[in-house]
Image (spheres, rainbow, N blue to C red):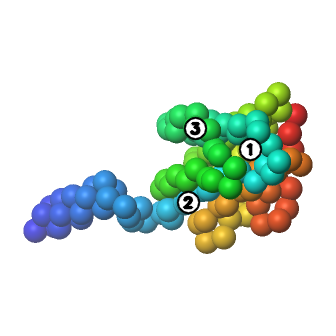
Amino acid sequence: MAKYLLLSFVLFMCLLHEGESCFIFRKIHVSVVNKLVNSDTPLSAHCYSRNDDLGNPTIPLNQEINFSFCMAPIFTLFKCELVWGERTSTVVVYSAAWRVDPCDKGKCVYYVTESGTYIDNQLWASWK
């Protein structure tokens, strides 16, 4: 009987993992918003982790890209490499190793401006 309960539990966890639920761990939602006013130069963002590459989309002015993932403690790290003309910036958009999480209950919204990338009205990353 214990084998069947364990097998049922494992199957249930697998089904939840394949769906929208993260089961035990928190689901993280990341948004990168283009707020580069008065600019004809496109903003591109290459977002990735060790296991996922989300491509290299161009983000129009006042538009955003969004992605979500299930956080794994200690190991989850997502970065976005932003390119705006000749300027570049590598932004850590989520790290499970952060001692202080700047995201609001799993929602991480980054605003890209001429002076850098902001989260919660604080400069998070500068242009190079």
- Asked whether 23 or 82 is in front, the reply is 82
Residue 12 horizontal/vertical position (percent): 24, 63
Check contact, mark 2 vs mark 1: CB within 8 A. no
> Residue 110 at x, y = what percent?
71, 56
Q: Is residue 22 above or below residue 39?
A: below
**Cα separation between marks 2 and 1:** 15 Å
Q: Which residue is mark 3?
A: 57
Marks 2 and 1, the one that precedes in the sequence: 2
Where is 25 relative to 89, above or below? below
Q: Nearer the viewer, mark 1 or mark 3?
A: 3
Q: Residue at x 76, y 60 (%)?
A: 119
SS of the residue at dot 3?
A: loop
Can you see residue 97?
A: no
* Mark 1 lies on residue: 91
Q: Residues within 10 Å of mark 3 (few under 14, many from 20)?
A: few
The image quadrant where one finds the C terminus is top right
Residue at figure coordinates x 53%, y 34% from the top left: 55
> Mark 2: which amino acid?
His
CA–CA distance between discs 3 and 2?
17 Å
Circles 3 and 2, Cβ within 8 Å, touching? The answer is: no
For badge 1, the amino acid type reads: Val
